[in-house]
Image (cartoon, rainbow, N blue to C red):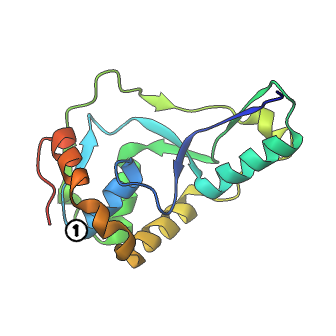
Amino acid sequence: METVICRGSNNYGTHQYPEKLIPLMILNALHGDPLPVYGDGMQVRNWIHATDFAAAIGHVLAYGVPGEVYNAGGPDECANIEVVERIIELTGADRSLIEYVQDRPGHDRRYSLSSDKVRALGWEPRVRFTQGLEETVAWYRDNSAWWEPIRSGEYRDYYARQYGRALGD
């Protein structure tokens, strides 16, 4: 069986479950809940919008060489605390909601990858992080019917275990 592999950097966008940094911070900011930031928040991540990663996968399927591995990263990288601060700006939340929590054991300081190989096939990411983050915040703001049920039940239990505190209502 011929195969290709396409690995993406940190994905973000609409409909993402709120255990991940961006939707977690957006929903907590919209609710006025604490914004838990691991360690000093200076962990650097490369971000790729989910639509760009989907396009990269399609491109690799169409043009990739069987047996090869391709990395697809976004056009921007930044520290987690910068992401949180931008979400605060976009939601109008108060910066005092930032709560530094104990870093995870073995938490990488930087996740990044080279997209040179997939770009050589003609693929390029289209969504800049600032634009994609604005659109993502707007989507969560406008689609509470999608995410409100998630903030109950098992997610509340997960949140309490993960961050050592209950999620606000």
Residue extending farthest to the front is 1
Q: Amino acid at mark 1?
A: His
SS class of the residue under badge 1? helix
Characterize the local packing of mark 1: few (<14), some (14-19) or many (20 or more) Cα atoms within 10 angstroms. Answer: some
Image height of 133 relative to 38, above or below: below
> Which residue is drawn at the image coordinates 28% and 28% (left, top)?
104
Question: Where in the figure is residue 85, as x and y percent of width and height?
Answer: 34, 56
Q: Residue at x 34, y 62 (%)?
A: 26
Taking depth in this image into account, of 4 and 85 the one nearest to the observer is 4
Q: Look at 18% across and 55% down and name the residue there.
A: 34
Q: Is residue 129 above or below residue 41?
A: below
Q: Is residue 167 left or right of residue 6?
A: left
User: Picture coordinates of residue 57 (x, y %)?
Assistant: 73, 45
Of the 4 image quadrants, the one containing the N terminus is top right
| Residue 97, x across and y down, in percent | 19, 57
Split into 4 quadrants, where in the image is the C terminus? bottom left
In screen coordinates, is 74 left or right of 41?
A: right
The vertical placement of 68 against 155, above or below, is: above
In this picture, residue 57 sits left or right of residue 34: right
Image quadrant in which you'd find residue 44 = top left
Q: Is residue 82 depicted above or below 115 in this figure?
A: below
Q: As rendered, which of 15 and 36 lies closer to the eye? A: 15
Q: Residue at x 49, y 62 (%)?
A: 133
Q: How many marks?
A: 1
Residue topped by disc 1: 31
On the image, which quarter does residue 145 sit in? bottom left
Residues 55 and 30: in front is 55
